[in-house]
Amino acid sequence: MQKLVIEGGSPLRGEIRISGAKNAALPILCATLLSRETLHVENVPHLKDVTTMLGLLAQMGVGITLDSSQCVALSGREIPNPVAPYELVKTMRASILVLGPLLARTGRASVSLPGGCAIGLRPVDLHIKGLQAMGAEIEVENGYIKASASKLHGARICMDLVSVTGTENLMMAATLASGVTVIENAAREPEVVDLANCLTAMGAKISGAGSDTIEIEGVDELHGARHRVMPDRIESGTFLVAAAASLGKIKLHGARADILDAVLDKLSESGAHISTGEESIFLEMRDRPKSVSIRTAPYPAFPTDMQAQFMVLNSVAEGSALITETIFENRFMHVQELCRMGAHIEVEGNAAMVRGKEHLGGATVMATDLRASASLVIAGLVARGETTIERIYHIDRGYECIEEKLAQLGAKIRRMA
Protein backbone atom coordinates (compact mmCIF):
# COMPACT_ATOMS: atom_id res chain seq x y z
CA MET A 1 0.00 0.00 0.00
CA GLN A 2 1.39 3.39 -0.99
CA LYS A 3 2.49 6.04 1.49
CA LEU A 4 3.79 9.61 1.48
CA VAL A 5 7.07 10.48 3.19
CA ILE A 6 7.64 14.14 4.04
CA GLU A 7 10.72 15.87 5.44
CA GLY A 8 9.30 18.92 7.21
CA GLY A 9 10.59 22.42 7.73
CA SER A 10 10.57 23.93 4.23
CA PRO A 11 8.30 26.95 3.66
CA LEU A 12 6.15 26.58 0.53
CA ARG A 13 7.17 29.09 -2.12
CA GLY A 14 6.21 29.40 -5.78
CA GLU A 15 3.24 29.10 -8.10
CA ILE A 16 0.89 26.25 -9.01
CA ARG A 17 -2.32 25.77 -10.99
CA ILE A 18 -5.51 24.62 -9.29
CA SER A 19 -7.38 21.64 -10.76
CA GLY A 20 -11.04 21.31 -11.62
CA ALA A 21 -13.35 20.68 -8.67
CA LYS A 22 -14.05 17.05 -7.83
CA ASN A 23 -17.33 17.94 -6.15
CA ALA A 24 -18.48 19.77 -9.28
CA ALA A 25 -17.16 17.27 -11.82
CA LEU A 26 -18.91 14.21 -10.35
CA PRO A 27 -22.53 15.46 -10.66
CA ILE A 28 -21.77 17.08 -14.02
CA LEU A 29 -20.53 13.72 -15.35
CA CYS A 30 -23.80 12.17 -14.13
CA ALA A 31 -25.75 14.78 -16.10
CA THR A 32 -24.82 12.93 -19.30
CA LEU A 33 -27.43 10.31 -18.31
CA LEU A 34 -30.15 12.91 -19.02
CA SER A 35 -29.44 13.27 -22.75
CA ARG A 36 -29.05 11.11 -25.84
CA GLU A 37 -26.53 13.62 -27.21
CA THR A 38 -22.87 14.08 -26.31
CA LEU A 39 -21.78 16.12 -23.32
CA HIS A 40 -18.23 17.54 -23.47
CA VAL A 41 -16.81 18.27 -20.02
CA GLU A 42 -13.57 20.27 -19.76
CA ASN A 43 -11.16 20.74 -16.84
CA VAL A 44 -11.98 17.31 -15.38
CA PRO A 45 -9.48 16.45 -12.61
CA HIS A 46 -7.60 13.16 -12.82
CA LEU A 47 -8.74 11.62 -9.53
CA LYS A 48 -9.68 8.19 -8.21
CA ASP A 49 -13.30 9.27 -7.62
CA VAL A 50 -13.57 10.58 -11.19
CA THR A 51 -12.16 7.32 -12.57
CA THR A 52 -14.69 5.39 -10.47
CA MET A 53 -17.56 7.54 -11.74
CA LEU A 54 -16.49 7.11 -15.36
CA GLY A 55 -16.32 3.37 -14.84
CA LEU A 56 -19.79 3.40 -13.32
CA LEU A 57 -21.23 5.36 -16.26
CA ALA A 58 -19.44 3.14 -18.79
CA GLN A 59 -20.95 -0.06 -17.38
CA MET A 60 -24.39 1.54 -17.74
CA GLY A 61 -23.75 2.01 -21.45
CA VAL A 62 -22.31 5.53 -21.68
CA GLY A 63 -19.66 5.94 -24.37
CA ILE A 64 -16.62 7.78 -22.99
CA THR A 65 -13.70 9.41 -24.80
CA LEU A 66 -10.86 11.20 -23.03
CA ASP A 67 -8.29 13.48 -24.62
CA SER A 68 -4.98 14.84 -23.36
CA SER A 69 -6.42 18.24 -22.42
CA GLN A 70 -8.56 16.93 -19.52
CA CYS A 71 -11.72 16.97 -21.64
CA VAL A 72 -14.14 14.05 -21.44
CA ALA A 73 -16.78 13.39 -24.11
CA LEU A 74 -19.72 11.33 -22.83
CA SER A 75 -22.43 9.85 -25.04
CA GLY A 76 -25.50 8.49 -23.28
CA ARG A 77 -27.43 7.62 -26.45
CA GLU A 78 -28.48 4.32 -24.90
CA ILE A 79 -28.59 3.36 -21.20
CA PRO A 80 -29.24 -0.40 -21.37
CA ASN A 81 -28.09 -1.12 -17.82
CA PRO A 82 -29.44 1.47 -15.31
CA VAL A 83 -27.69 -0.23 -12.39
CA ALA A 84 -25.00 1.06 -10.01
CA PRO A 85 -23.47 -2.11 -8.52
CA TYR A 86 -21.93 -2.33 -5.06
CA GLU A 87 -18.50 -3.17 -6.48
CA LEU A 88 -18.26 0.29 -8.09
CA VAL A 89 -20.22 2.25 -5.51
CA LYS A 90 -18.66 1.04 -2.27
CA THR A 91 -15.75 3.53 -2.28
CA MET A 92 -17.64 6.66 -3.32
CA ARG A 93 -20.74 8.21 -1.79
CA ALA A 94 -21.21 10.54 -4.78
CA SER A 95 -22.40 7.52 -6.79
CA ILE A 96 -25.89 8.20 -5.38
CA LEU A 97 -25.98 11.06 -7.94
CA VAL A 98 -26.88 8.63 -10.73
CA LEU A 99 -30.22 7.85 -9.09
CA GLY A 100 -32.14 10.97 -10.13
CA PRO A 101 -30.98 11.20 -13.75
CA LEU A 102 -31.40 7.44 -14.34
CA LEU A 103 -34.95 7.52 -13.04
CA ALA A 104 -35.85 10.62 -15.06
CA ARG A 105 -34.35 9.31 -18.30
CA THR A 106 -35.07 5.55 -18.21
CA GLY A 107 -37.89 5.27 -15.68
CA ARG A 108 -35.98 2.82 -13.53
CA ALA A 109 -32.82 2.58 -11.45
CA SER A 110 -31.11 0.16 -9.11
CA VAL A 111 -28.41 1.87 -7.08
CA SER A 112 -26.36 0.30 -4.31
CA LEU A 113 -26.28 2.23 -1.05
CA PRO A 114 -23.03 4.20 -1.29
CA GLY A 115 -19.76 4.05 0.63
CA GLY A 116 -16.97 6.62 0.87
CA CYS A 117 -15.26 8.33 3.79
CA ALA A 118 -16.23 7.14 7.27
CA ILE A 119 -16.90 10.64 8.61
CA GLY A 120 -20.49 10.11 9.69
CA LEU A 121 -24.01 9.48 8.52
CA ARG A 122 -25.05 10.95 5.18
CA PRO A 123 -28.58 9.57 4.86
CA VAL A 124 -30.07 8.98 1.44
CA ASP A 125 -33.55 9.57 2.87
CA LEU A 126 -33.57 13.12 1.48
CA HIS A 127 -33.01 11.81 -2.05
CA ILE A 128 -35.66 9.12 -1.69
CA LYS A 129 -38.33 11.40 -0.17
CA GLY A 130 -37.80 14.01 -2.88
CA LEU A 131 -38.10 11.49 -5.71
CA GLN A 132 -41.17 9.94 -4.11
CA ALA A 133 -42.75 13.39 -4.03
CA MET A 134 -42.11 13.50 -7.79
CA GLY A 135 -44.02 10.24 -8.29
CA ALA A 136 -41.31 7.58 -7.98
CA GLU A 137 -41.93 4.22 -6.38
CA ILE A 138 -38.89 3.29 -4.30
CA GLU A 139 -37.92 0.31 -2.17
CA VAL A 140 -34.67 -0.32 -0.32
CA GLU A 141 -33.81 -4.01 -0.23
CA ASN A 142 -30.65 -6.11 -0.09
CA GLY A 143 -28.51 -2.96 0.09
CA TYR A 144 -29.98 -1.44 -3.08
CA ILE A 145 -32.28 1.48 -3.78
CA LYS A 146 -34.74 0.19 -6.40
CA ALA A 147 -36.77 2.93 -8.06
CA SER A 148 -39.28 3.14 -10.89
CA ALA A 149 -41.52 5.79 -12.41
CA SER A 150 -43.35 5.93 -15.72
CA LYS A 151 -42.95 9.72 -15.69
CA LEU A 152 -41.76 11.99 -12.90
CA HIS A 153 -43.88 15.08 -12.21
CA GLY A 154 -43.10 18.43 -10.67
CA ALA A 155 -43.43 18.87 -6.93
CA ARG A 156 -42.67 21.29 -4.11
CA ILE A 157 -39.91 19.70 -2.04
CA CYS A 158 -38.70 21.11 1.27
CA MET A 159 -35.41 19.52 2.29
CA ASP A 160 -35.30 18.53 5.98
CA LEU A 161 -31.55 19.22 5.99
CA VAL A 162 -29.34 21.17 3.63
CA SER A 163 -27.81 18.51 1.36
CA VAL A 164 -25.55 19.21 -1.61
CA THR A 165 -25.95 15.80 -3.28
CA GLY A 166 -29.65 15.75 -2.40
CA THR A 167 -30.17 19.11 -4.08
CA GLU A 168 -28.16 18.03 -7.12
CA ASN A 169 -29.94 14.68 -7.50
CA LEU A 170 -33.41 16.21 -7.32
CA MET A 171 -32.46 19.10 -9.60
CA MET A 172 -31.25 16.67 -12.29
CA ALA A 173 -34.36 14.51 -11.97
CA ALA A 174 -36.61 17.57 -12.21
CA THR A 175 -35.15 18.70 -15.55
CA LEU A 176 -37.09 15.94 -17.37
CA ALA A 177 -40.15 15.84 -15.08
CA SER A 178 -43.49 17.19 -16.27
CA GLY A 179 -44.38 20.52 -14.72
CA VAL A 180 -42.48 22.68 -12.24
CA THR A 181 -40.39 21.48 -9.30
CA VAL A 182 -39.44 23.79 -6.44
CA ILE A 183 -36.65 22.73 -4.06
CA GLU A 184 -36.75 24.64 -0.77
CA ASN A 185 -33.90 24.72 1.76
CA ALA A 186 -31.65 23.87 -1.19
CA ALA A 187 -27.87 23.79 -0.91
CA ARG A 188 -26.25 27.04 -2.06
CA GLU A 189 -22.76 25.67 -2.77
CA PRO A 190 -20.90 26.89 -5.90
CA GLU A 191 -20.80 23.28 -7.11
CA VAL A 192 -24.62 23.27 -7.23
CA VAL A 193 -24.47 26.44 -9.34
CA ASP A 194 -21.89 24.84 -11.64
CA LEU A 195 -24.16 21.83 -12.21
CA ALA A 196 -27.12 24.15 -12.88
CA ASN A 197 -25.02 26.04 -15.44
CA CYS A 198 -24.17 22.76 -17.19
CA LEU A 199 -27.80 21.62 -17.19
CA THR A 200 -28.91 25.01 -18.53
CA ALA A 201 -26.38 24.68 -21.36
CA MET A 202 -28.06 21.32 -22.11
CA GLY A 203 -31.45 23.00 -22.40
CA ALA A 204 -32.78 22.76 -18.84
CA LYS A 205 -34.88 25.59 -17.39
CA ILE A 206 -33.50 26.36 -13.93
CA SER A 207 -33.70 29.50 -11.82
CA GLY A 208 -32.53 30.27 -8.31
CA ALA A 209 -29.37 28.12 -8.20
CA GLY A 210 -27.11 29.56 -5.52
CA SER A 211 -30.08 30.52 -3.35
CA ASP A 212 -32.06 28.37 -0.91
CA THR A 213 -34.96 28.02 -3.38
CA ILE A 214 -34.41 26.48 -6.80
CA GLU A 215 -37.15 26.23 -9.42
CA ILE A 216 -36.95 23.81 -12.34
CA GLU A 217 -39.40 23.73 -15.22
CA GLY A 218 -39.26 20.30 -16.81
CA VAL A 219 -38.57 19.87 -20.53
CA ASP A 220 -39.13 16.92 -22.87
CA GLU A 221 -35.45 16.32 -23.54
CA LEU A 222 -31.98 17.76 -23.05
CA HIS A 223 -29.36 18.13 -25.76
CA GLY A 224 -25.59 17.95 -25.85
CA ALA A 225 -23.38 20.77 -24.61
CA ARG A 226 -19.84 21.80 -23.68
CA HIS A 227 -19.09 22.81 -20.10
CA ARG A 228 -15.92 23.67 -18.17
CA VAL A 229 -15.73 22.47 -14.56
CA MET A 230 -15.13 25.21 -11.99
CA PRO A 231 -11.82 25.30 -10.03
CA ASP A 232 -11.59 23.29 -6.83
CA ARG A 233 -12.12 25.67 -3.90
CA ILE A 234 -11.11 23.04 -1.34
CA GLU A 235 -7.83 22.30 -3.12
CA SER A 236 -7.24 26.07 -3.26
CA GLY A 237 -7.95 26.40 0.46
CA THR A 238 -5.74 23.43 1.32
CA PHE A 239 -2.69 24.86 -0.45
CA LEU A 240 -3.29 28.31 1.06
CA VAL A 241 -3.43 26.83 4.58
CA ALA A 242 -0.29 24.79 3.88
CA ALA A 243 1.53 27.96 2.83
CA ALA A 244 0.27 29.87 5.86
CA ALA A 245 1.24 27.12 8.31
CA SER A 246 4.72 26.77 6.78
CA LEU A 247 5.35 30.56 6.71
CA GLY A 248 5.36 30.42 2.94
CA LYS A 249 4.59 32.61 -0.04
CA ILE A 250 2.54 31.16 -2.92
CA LYS A 251 0.38 32.13 -5.87
CA LEU A 252 -2.48 29.98 -7.12
CA HIS A 253 -3.48 30.20 -10.78
CA GLY A 254 -6.90 29.15 -12.03
CA ALA A 255 -8.41 29.82 -8.60
CA ARG A 256 -11.54 31.80 -7.67
CA ALA A 257 -11.48 34.02 -4.61
CA ASP A 258 -15.21 34.78 -4.82
CA ILE A 259 -16.11 31.24 -3.68
CA LEU A 260 -13.58 31.19 -0.82
CA ASP A 261 -14.68 34.19 1.25
CA ALA A 262 -15.03 32.36 4.58
CA VAL A 263 -11.64 30.64 4.22
CA LEU A 264 -9.82 33.78 3.08
CA ASP A 265 -11.33 35.78 5.94
CA LYS A 266 -10.01 33.28 8.49
CA LEU A 267 -6.58 33.18 6.86
CA SER A 268 -6.43 36.97 7.00
CA GLU A 269 -7.47 36.81 10.66
CA SER A 270 -4.56 34.41 11.27
CA GLY A 271 -2.15 37.03 9.94
CA ALA A 272 -1.78 36.03 6.28
CA HIS A 273 -1.32 38.75 3.66
CA ILE A 274 -3.66 37.97 0.76
CA SER A 275 -4.32 39.57 -2.60
CA THR A 276 -6.57 38.27 -5.35
CA GLY A 277 -6.97 38.59 -9.10
CA GLU A 278 -9.67 37.45 -11.48
CA GLU A 279 -8.26 33.91 -11.57
CA SER A 280 -5.50 34.01 -8.98
CA ILE A 281 -4.89 34.15 -5.24
CA PHE A 282 -1.62 35.25 -3.62
CA LEU A 283 -0.78 34.52 0.03
CA GLU A 284 2.25 35.36 2.17
CA MET A 285 2.66 34.53 5.86
CA ARG A 286 5.47 36.65 7.30
CA ASP A 287 5.15 35.74 10.99
CA ARG A 288 3.91 32.83 13.06
CA PRO A 289 0.12 32.55 12.50
CA LYS A 290 -2.42 33.52 15.15
CA SER A 291 -5.06 31.04 16.32
CA VAL A 292 -8.51 31.40 14.74
CA SER A 293 -11.74 29.82 15.97
CA ILE A 294 -14.03 28.35 13.33
CA ARG A 295 -17.51 26.86 13.14
CA THR A 296 -18.45 24.78 10.13
CA ALA A 297 -21.82 25.31 8.45
CA PRO A 298 -23.36 25.04 4.97
CA TYR A 299 -22.17 27.47 2.29
CA PRO A 300 -21.53 30.41 2.36
CA ALA A 301 -20.30 29.78 5.92
CA PHE A 302 -17.03 28.02 6.74
CA PRO A 303 -16.79 24.66 4.89
CA THR A 304 -16.52 21.40 6.79
CA ASP A 305 -14.03 20.26 4.13
CA MET A 306 -11.53 22.85 5.44
CA GLN A 307 -11.92 22.09 9.15
CA ALA A 308 -9.08 19.55 9.42
CA GLN A 309 -6.61 21.80 7.58
CA PHE A 310 -7.30 24.73 9.92
CA MET A 311 -6.83 22.41 12.90
CA VAL A 312 -3.22 21.95 11.79
CA LEU A 313 -2.79 25.69 11.31
CA ASN A 314 -4.06 26.27 14.86
CA SER A 315 -1.76 23.53 16.17
CA VAL A 316 1.30 25.66 15.30
CA ALA A 317 -0.28 29.08 15.85
CA GLU A 318 0.00 31.54 18.73
CA GLY A 319 -2.78 31.13 21.27
CA SER A 320 -5.77 28.80 21.53
CA ALA A 321 -8.83 28.34 19.33
CA LEU A 322 -12.12 26.44 19.38
CA ILE A 323 -13.15 24.42 16.32
CA THR A 324 -16.82 23.44 16.18
CA GLU A 325 -18.02 20.84 13.65
CA THR A 326 -21.75 21.06 12.88
CA ILE A 327 -21.99 19.08 9.63
CA PHE A 328 -20.62 15.58 10.33
CA GLU A 329 -20.68 13.88 13.70
CA ASN A 330 -17.49 11.86 13.19
CA ARG A 331 -15.08 14.28 11.56
CA PHE A 332 -12.41 14.55 14.25
CA MET A 333 -10.65 11.29 13.46
CA HIS A 334 -7.53 13.22 12.45
CA VAL A 335 -7.16 14.54 16.01
CA GLN A 336 -5.58 11.35 17.32
CA GLU A 337 -3.04 11.34 14.49
CA LEU A 338 -2.16 15.01 14.98
CA CYS A 339 -1.67 14.37 18.69
CA ARG A 340 0.85 11.65 17.73
CA MET A 341 2.81 14.48 16.14
CA GLY A 342 2.69 16.53 19.33
CA ALA A 343 -0.41 18.66 18.77
CA HIS A 344 -2.35 19.79 21.86
CA ILE A 345 -6.02 19.11 21.04
CA GLU A 346 -8.88 18.25 23.38
CA VAL A 347 -12.20 17.08 21.96
CA GLU A 348 -15.53 17.30 23.69
CA GLY A 349 -18.58 16.38 21.63
CA ASN A 350 -18.55 18.30 18.38
CA ALA A 351 -15.93 20.82 19.54
CA ALA A 352 -12.14 20.70 19.70
CA MET A 353 -9.95 23.07 21.70
CA VAL A 354 -6.58 23.52 19.99
CA ARG A 355 -3.66 25.03 21.91
CA GLY A 356 -0.93 26.12 19.58
CA LYS A 357 2.74 25.22 20.04
CA GLU A 358 5.82 26.28 18.15
CA HIS A 359 6.63 22.91 16.60
CA LEU A 360 5.15 19.54 15.71
CA GLY A 361 7.31 16.45 15.40
CA GLY A 362 7.48 13.94 12.58
CA ALA A 363 5.76 10.59 13.10
CA THR A 364 4.11 7.72 11.27
CA VAL A 365 0.40 8.49 10.94
CA MET A 366 -2.61 7.04 9.17
CA ALA A 367 -5.11 8.86 6.95
CA THR A 368 -8.72 8.17 7.93
CA ASP A 369 -10.59 10.17 5.26
CA LEU A 370 -9.98 12.53 2.36
CA ARG A 371 -9.65 15.86 4.19
CA ALA A 372 -7.98 14.29 7.21
CA SER A 373 -5.26 13.03 4.88
CA ALA A 374 -4.75 16.58 3.59
CA SER A 375 -4.37 17.84 7.16
CA LEU A 376 -1.71 15.21 7.86
CA VAL A 377 0.22 16.30 4.77
CA ILE A 378 0.19 19.89 6.05
CA ALA A 379 1.29 18.68 9.48
CA GLY A 380 4.14 16.78 7.88
CA LEU A 381 5.23 19.87 5.97
CA VAL A 382 5.54 21.95 9.16
CA ALA A 383 6.85 19.22 11.52
CA ARG A 384 10.45 18.75 12.53
CA GLY A 385 11.85 15.54 11.09
CA GLU A 386 10.26 12.92 8.86
CA THR A 387 6.55 12.10 8.65
CA THR A 388 5.15 8.98 6.97
CA ILE A 389 1.47 9.03 6.00
CA GLU A 390 -0.12 5.65 5.39
CA ARG A 391 -3.40 4.74 3.62
CA ILE A 392 -3.03 7.65 1.20
CA TYR A 393 -5.59 6.20 -1.20
CA HIS A 394 -7.96 8.63 0.49
CA ILE A 395 -5.99 11.64 -0.72
CA ASP A 396 -5.90 10.35 -4.30
CA ARG A 397 -9.70 10.51 -4.30
CA GLY A 398 -9.70 14.30 -4.04
CA TYR A 399 -6.30 15.86 -4.78
CA GLU A 400 -4.74 15.71 -8.22
CA CYS A 401 -0.97 15.16 -8.22
CA ILE A 402 -0.62 16.53 -4.70
CA GLU A 403 3.00 15.50 -4.19
CA GLU A 404 4.04 16.92 -7.58
CA LYS A 405 2.38 20.26 -6.81
CA LEU A 406 3.91 20.42 -3.34
CA ALA A 407 7.35 19.53 -4.73
CA GLN A 408 6.90 22.36 -7.23
CA LEU A 409 6.50 24.63 -4.20
CA GLY A 410 9.69 23.35 -2.60
CA ALA A 411 8.33 20.62 -0.33
CA LYS A 412 10.48 17.56 0.36
CA ILE A 413 7.89 14.88 -0.33
CA ARG A 414 7.92 11.52 -2.06
CA ARG A 415 5.55 8.65 -2.69
CA MET A 416 6.62 5.15 -1.74
CA ALA A 417 5.11 1.72 -2.33
Image (cartoon, helix red, strand yellow):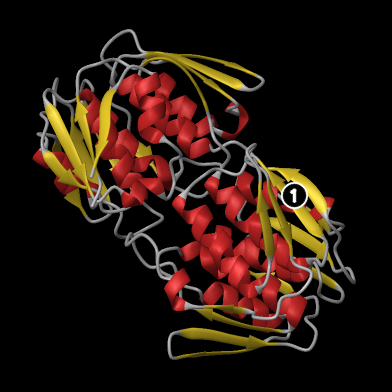
1 horizontally vs 263: left or right: left
Q: Is residue 205 left or right of residue 192?
A: right
> Which residue is disc 1 drawn over?
40
- Camera sees residue 210: no
Give the secondary structure at mark 1. Answer: strand
Side of 68 relative to 182 (left or right): left
Choose top left, top right, bottom left or bottom right for residue 407: top left
- Front in this rendered view, residue 20 or 301: 20
Q: Is 270 rendered above or below residue 101? A: above
* Residue 239 higher or lower than 335, as above or below: above
Query: Where is the C terminus found, in terms of image quarters?
Result: top left
- Residue at image position (11%, 24%) is 385
- Most extreme residue toward the right is 220
Query: Horizontal and vertical percent for residue 57?
Result: 61, 66
Identity of the residue drawn at 57% across and 87% down:
146
Q: Amino acid at mark 1?
A: His
Give the quadrant of residue 362: top left
What x and y, as percent, mark residue 255?
58, 27
| x and y, in percent, of residue 161 in the image | 53, 65
What crowding class fits label 1: few (fewer than 14 Cα within 10 Å), some (14-19), or many (20 or more)? many
The mark tally for this picture is 1
Expressed as whole percent of the image width and height from the top left, the position of residue 229 reads 66, 42
Residue occupying the point 56% across, 67% down: 56
Q: Is residue 30 visible?
A: yes
